[in-house]
Amino acid sequence: MSSRVEKLLESLEETEVFFLEYSRIRSYGKAIFLIEGKDDPKFYTSKISTIFGDLWDAVSVGGKSKVLELRVSIRSHPMFKADKVFFLMDRDFDRRELDADVYTTPSYSIENLYCDSTTIKNLIIGECGLSNYKIDRRADIINFIVQEYERLQKTFHRSKKIITVNSVFLYIRKEMHSKKISLDKVFKVDVKIAGGSLVVKLSRRSEYNAVRLTEKTKFKEFLDQSPQLKETLNSPGMLFRGKQEILFLREFVKLLKEDGALSKDVFIKFGYKLKLENPSMADHVLSSLAQYVRTPECLSSFLNRGKAIAF
């Protein structure tokens, strides 16, 4: 049996397992959210609970394709097709799928939403003691930190290496139609912030030469002509690959530690001793920062409409 057939059968088996799990929990009478990734509930839980209270449950199914496969299975099932079930997934490099029961992020992924500068503002107010209005020049300190974040983030998005990563990966996904080549097999990305400067390192991986050698001419045409690439480059914060955005966010959060470079700058400039209360936060940004991420208006609207449908 070929590896391709084996993978297909394995995928079908996994979908069947999730379908069985869904058929079990649907009997509880709650709205059910089928969510793409294992880390996604860290973001969605508080957002859904705000609208649905305790009247919901969720299952992470391990991929966008599985979310869509399960939707077909459920909506074509004679007993399940009218269930109170909703499907949440990332946009990736695809067009957004919008329906009464389908939510697609307005950005490449949930991770991009974490990296909005409003998250940094909420974070330093909540975790660095800057909620105290008695702090001298409090607003100036907050603005300074947020502006530094935006400056470094702009530099990050203008990096030729980060642009290369996203251009190549978009090409692989949309022109080569390959869902199997992960970016980690093409490039390894490393991000550091030192001395107020951003350093991006890019290492070529095993699949890079295969793409470069076999697709060189087509890739050049893609760089010159692709409207989707132009759109992506014009909105990097929203449309660049989310995992690289999180690498940058993690490095910035490290600067807020008591001995971090940005904390030292704040003390020199404002005489305020900035201290991140949770020094390990950078290692767990998806969990620790979820409460500080702004809820997109499209998600609030989707959940409110969903509640009206479900109840």
Image (spheres, rainbow, N blue to C red):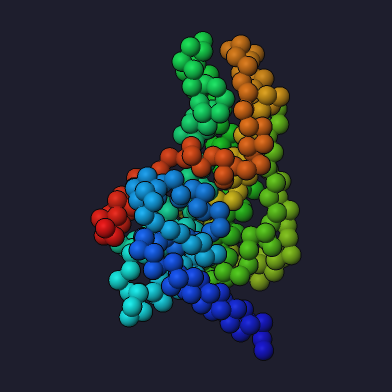
Q: Quadrant of the C terminus?
A: bottom left
**Residue at horizontal 69%, vertical 62%?**
185
188 vs 127, left or right, is right
Q: Quadrant of the N terminus?
A: bottom right
**Observer-nearest residue: 75 or 216?**
75
Instruction: Give the quarter of the image for residue 259.
Output: top right
Instruction: Give the quarter of the image for residue 270.
Output: top right
**Residue at horizontal 52%, vertical 49%?**
42
Q: Is residue 140 in view from this perspective?
A: no
102 vs 173, left or right, is left
Q: Residue furthest bottom?
A: 1
Q: Is residue 67 in view from this perspective?
A: yes
Q: Is residue 154 above or below residue 275?
A: below
Image location (x, y in percent) of residue 227: 44, 58
**Observer-nearest residue: 142 or 221?**
142
**Residue at horizontal 53%, vertical 19%?**
141
Image location (x, y in percent) of residue 291: 48, 39
262 vs 19, left or right, is right
Count the marks: how many?
Answer: 0
**Residue at horizontal 51%, vertical 13%?**
135
Image location (x, y in percent) of residue 120: 52, 33
**Observer-nearest residue: 149 or 218?**
149
Image location (x, y in percent) of residue 96: 39, 60
Q: Is residue 97 above or below residue 293?
A: below
